[in-house]
Image: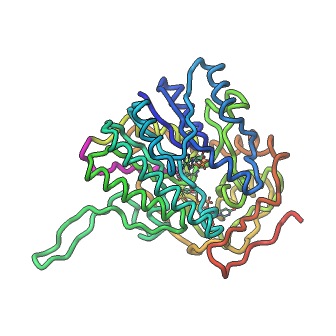
Amino acid sequence: MKVLVLGGDGFCGWPTALHLSAQGHEVTIVDNLARRCIDVELEVDSLTPISPMGVRIEVWKELTGRDIGFINLDLAQEYDRLVDVLLNERPDAVVHFAEQRAAPYSMRSPKAKRYTVDNNVNGTHNLLCAIVQTGLDISVVHLGTMGVYGYGWSGTAPIPEGYLTVKVPTPDGDLDREILHPANPGSVYHMTKTLDQLLFAFYAKNDGLRNTARHHGIVWGTQTPQTALDERLINRFDYDGDYGTVLNRFLMQAAIGHPLTVHGTGGQTRAFIHIRDTVRCVEIALNNPPKRGDQPSVFNQVTETYRVRDLAELISQKTGVEVANLPNPRKEAAENDLIVTRDRFLALGLEPTTLSEGLLEEVRDISSKYAHRADTSKIIARSVWNAGMETSPDLMR
Ligand code: NAD
Ligand code: USQ
């Protein structure tokens, strides 16, 4: 299959590009390297030393003999070039990762909020509009997020895969209807993902586009078998207060002896998935596209759920590093339940990696090895959800 990986220089995109190439697919990465520019803006680097794109592709070719193409293109701004790329490449499928994906970054300033909306909503719309313009039959696999549902809106009722069956009262009795699950975003970033869903639903209904949305939990881990082949293929590892996600941050903090930065009581329950499972799920979604005329196919891509304070406790027990309860910079419930239906990927053959299997390996191999690259002043989360919120003191002074 010929596949374009949009956002293929990023944390999920790079290992996916390598995985698909290793499976024999013809892969071209499309990325404007915006994430590397945000590292420069935030004055922080991936904990792991990521190579320039040219080196990454050259090393992959050297080790495997396989070619991966690269096109530097801004999906949100370069519409005409995007149409030309689709017409020239004529892909069977596009995997769409190319968005600003950090909730804290999306809340840090008016500029960042506006960038996140412009970039994500325009980028997704440009892609769908361009596919229709070319008349090509390209299926799209999009990385959505569990955050489109909110966290615990329905209490202990399991979150369904995308759609909810509701009863609509009418004078002649109740009608059963299947609707998109109500959107309940918790940040400007998550809001853009809820808008993406409407764009996908519209283009499926109006133009018969074939779309799969994968509502992903928080991705943890770093390496896949392909990124581990050579240090120059290593995946990025974000640990800073804006881009670092909770489990990878706790693992890195444990490795350098930094108190574990639990926000508030740590009562938020979240869904998790290892990067190795992310790449396998993309492959499963590519191999099982919806038919023309179907509504977007939605998978919940989650392997485990954990409460944040339980994760911190688990890592603290294994490493002896203390837990710090900091003021929560986010506007989120103190406690929530999160029960997720996730039958579809399991039915299609996913064998999930669980936390108990991968945890210590990750601390040993990555966080400890690259601990010397950490800038401890970047660990505390400083982006607050609204003006009245306090930030936490630096714990390493
Ligand atoms: P990332 O920031 O590491 O990668 C995103 C990539 O897209 C970057 O390489 C960036 O340069 C590129 N990009 C951004 N805007 C672009 C544009 N306009 N044109 C071209 N390229 C552009 O993020 P990630 O962690 O790999 O996440 C990828 C996708 O997966 C996102 O859509 C995110 O919402 C989703 N997701 C991620 C997680 C997670 O825990 N990392 C969890 C759930 C969903
Ligand atoms: N948290 C802490 N301490 C920290 C960091 C985070 O207690 O040091 C808490 C947060 O307050 C929050 C939870 O941990 O309650 C998760 O935060 P996160 O930064 O790990 O995850 P989130 O902001 O939800 O975003 C990440 C990705 C995003 C993806 C989402 C999937 O950045 O791209 O969409 O996970 S999900 O959470 O399932 O919606």
Q: Is residue 280 visible?
A: yes
Q: How is the image coloured?
A: rainbow
- State the residue at coordinates (65%, 38%): 223
Which range of residues does the magenta coloring cover? 292-304
In this rendered view, identify the residue nearer to me: 58 or 325. Answer: 58
**In the image, is residue 138 above or below residue 63?**
below
In this rendered view, identify the residue nearer to me: 296 or 39. Answer: 39
In this rendered view, identify the residue nearer to me: 151 or 113. Answer: 113
- State the residue at coordinates (31%, 45%): 209
Query: Could you tell me residue 242's position as x and y percent?
Result: 68, 60
Residue 111, quarter of the rendered image: bottom right
**In the image, is residue 112 above or below residue 386?**
above
On-image quarter of the C terminus: bottom right
Query: Which residue lies most toward the top here?
Result: 65
Query: Could you tell me residue 81's position as x and y percent?
Result: 47, 40
- Magenta-span inclusion, residue 297: yes
On-image quarter of the N terminus: top left
